[in-house]
Amino acid sequence: MAVKATVFNNGPVRLEASDPVELAIFDQAGNMFGLAGRTVISLCRCGLSANKPFCDGAHNREGFQSSCEARELPAPKPKPVP
């Protein structure tokens, strides 16, 4: 199963999975956040959340604005050969 990510205009990125086992969020050191069985979480995009990396609604209080429309990304550049 895939995890569905939805980018909300002027808001967070919501991750949705059909099973809690499919949703795992890690910090830079590789430590996993305890999600308490959640299958839906929202990640902060505005940088103002007091509960980073999770959204706490600060984008609404602070007037964060960012619109994102789906588009095709260019193909990745080839990695240099050592």
Image (cartoon, rainbow, N blue to C red):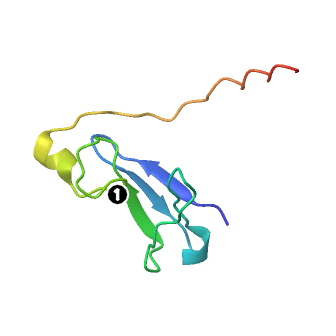
Q: In the picture, residue 65 is in which quadrant?
A: top left
Q: Which residue is mark 1?
A: 54
* Left or right: 57 in relation to 20: left
Q: Is residue 37 visible?
A: yes
- The quadrant of the rendering that contains the C terminus is top right
> Which of these two is toward me, 54 or 19?
54
**Image position of 2 (left or right of 14):** right
How far across and how far down the image is residue 72, in percent? Answer: 61, 29
Looking at the picture, does residue 40 appear above or below residue 5? below
66 w.r.t. 79: above or below: below
Q: Position of residue 25 (x, y in %)?
A: 51, 61
Q: Residue at x 53, y 59 (%)?
A: 26
Residue 3 shown left or right of residue 54 in the figure: right
Rendering coords of residue 64 (x, y %): 21, 37
User: Is residue 19 something one can see in this rendering?
Assistant: no
Q: 51 or 56: nearer the eye? A: 51
